[in-house]
Amino acid sequence: MSGFAVDTPFTDLDHEEELAFYDHNDNISIDLNALDFGSRTNPFLRAIHWLSAFVTARRRRDFHLEDIELFDNDADLGNEYHTKKKSIWGIPGGTIVNGSLVVIIGLLIAIIVILAGKNNQQTTPLPIIEKNILTNGTNEWYPTTILISLDGFHPHYISEENTPFLSKLWQRAYSAPYMIPSNPTVTFTNHWTLVTGLKPIYHGIVGNKFFDSKLGETFDRANKDMLDAKWWGGDPIWSTAEKQHVKAATHMWPGSEVKLPFDATFVDPFDIDESLNNKVLKISQWLDLNLQERPQLMLAYVPTIDTIGHKYGVSGNELKQALLDVDNLVLNIYSALDQRNISSLANVVIVSDHGMSPTSDDRLILLDDLVDLDVIDHMDNWPLYGLRPKLAIDVDAIYESIDMAWQKHPLKNMFNVYRREDIQQEIFGGFNDIYNERIAPIWIIPKIGYSITTAAAMAKEISYTPKGVHGYSNSEVLMRALFLATGPYFEEKLGSSHYLKPFDNTEIYNIVCDSIDVEPCPNNGTIPSYVQEGSVLEDDWLDEYAYPNVQFEISILKEDSLLESKFSAKVAQKEQEEVVATDAEQILNPTPAAQGGTETLLKTTQTTLTPVPITPHPQKLWDKLHNVVTAAEEFVDEAIDEIEDLFHSHS
């Protein structure tokens, strides 16, 4: 295994310290205000899950990365493998006896469970279900997914110079131009969203630090009390998996040490001295367990880029070295898979929670200039500031006072003042009686790159720190997150279509659940998964916003970003202008090879600029069945409504 040039520990998950937010509609219709995570999801989804297992064991196709040096496709065992499934009703898994019969059975089951679900939404955990078994020719494996979080890693950071392995991987893997983090774009909030599929207002972790007026207590990620389950709502993916007899392992994932009814089988607690090498060793140890002990789901948290970003900003040699270290980490994880001849069996999902923005002494807003701090009881979150006046102080009066100060402030265009009800939907994802009181009544929200601080804090500093900050609006280019994935699940779902449209990070939970054949709990994501044909990126898609997309001068990494060169509208326009200029020069001053070839030259140029269309991937049988059963559900609902109306009209 390769070592790391800099393998130092980190000290913190996040440094302390006109409104535009992405606000996508939920993709499912479930009352998230009345979630019961002790039970399973509705009977209809259980029938879907059962029928999927009956119809076919997913055929896992080979995933080859020939262009990446570590993958040896000529290894002794090769990359070929087979899928086995124990029989149900004596019929071998993967065998479809009769397509029409299966559809009819599916419709009957759907109708039965829909009718049953009308009167009984509370269900008990399913019994043990036979799992798909994969083999590489030597060992057997259950469907396996490794979820890796690279805290603070902006997709712009991927380049051939700074991340050579990730650069090659990105060109062969499945990815999106970016993933949209949840607001506020801080570590604990987004890591809990990633593993629950819920917006912050539904899982309760509305920031790295916040006050709950119902409990009369403060959640602080630096306090051990934060591990009390009373703070953490939703059902994390390791709990969802364990309830369904799927073993899970977590390595330092924020929130994984919280004691829940169904904890992960293996839990590595947060370790301030943890090295990057040890992370690879831990994953390797899990991979080496036998079939019955080995976790099918593994989660690993890597804070290196976030730590360096806070300390040094979004450029510089320190960041470059950290990127190389993390790149080496990912390389070694893939090497571990390749050494075990399972690179074609295991899914790897690499994400980040947010990006990073630089700070400056020239972009500071003193809170003292806006409000008398003596009347404030609690200050929540950061860099957004939620203010809670003392109980004896009128909230409306304080808001009006701050608003008047804002109108006179020389930097009034660089921040805004809001009441909770004005921004709760956009920032925290909605309204929820369980967690509404975790949202402060008054908010001061700076624009990207601007920081709010106090005179007392600055009196202790020579200049403002940290040098890098996140937590701003998720619509900002600098706050974008990373998504990159490999493995048979994505190969099967997407085929040759390697790019997905940008999507909310609430989708990760369902994606991972689907990849290991686990039924998800209610959430804000797409059912069954965002990874589907309808999510494929248009072949001519270009990003109109170029990194970093800010109104002030900042220093950024100079190396060419792979994603910028692929998706940037500005880069495409520049390249087109250069081509046109070259054409004009050759027409005016033709070279011997171009003499008499003007028409051919222009045609060649035009052909080069035309995007290559992506071949549509054939719709899978299960997708067709899912569509049919969905239509059946709607038909049954309408029929029941009509029967009820008829009954009431004659009663």
Image (cartoon, rainbow, N blue to C red):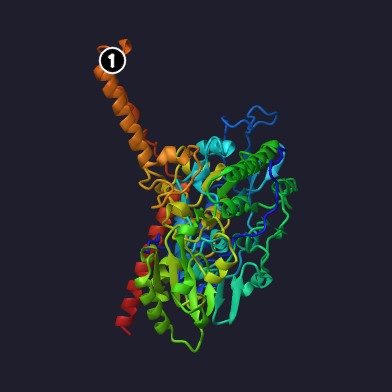
**601 is higher (above) or lower (below) than 414:** above
Residue situated in front as seen by the camera: 222 or 340:
222
Looking at the rendered structure, the number of numbered marks drawn on it comes to 1
Residue situated in front as seen by the camera: 604 or 239:
604
Q: Which residue is depicted at the point 38% across and 61% down?
A: 20
Query: Where in the figure is residue 70, as x and y percent of width and height?
Result: 64, 32
Q: Which residue is mark 1?
A: 590
| Farthest top residue in view | 592
Query: Where in the figure is residue 439, as x and y percent of width and height?
Result: 49, 74
Query: Where in the figure is residue 28, as x and y percent of width and height?
Result: 43, 63
Query: Where in the figure is residue 413, as x and y percent of width and height?
Result: 36, 63
**530 is higher (above) or lower (below) than 163:** below
| Farthest bottom residue in view | 392
Q: Is residue 276 left or right of residue 561?
A: right
> In what quadrant of the picture does the C terminus appear?
bottom left
Name the quadrant containing residue 574. top left
Graded by Cα atoms within 10 Å as few (under 14), some (14 to 19) or many (20 or more), the crowding at tag 1 reads some
> In what quadrant of the picture does the N terminus appear?
top right
Residue 610 is at least partly visible in this image: no
Mark 1 residue element: loop
- Please name the amino acid that badge 1 sits on: Pro
Q: Is residue 69 left or right of residue 573?
A: right
Residue 60 is at least partly visible in this image: yes
Residue situated in front as seen by the camera: 405 or 501:
405
Q: Is residue 642 left or right of residue 94?
A: left
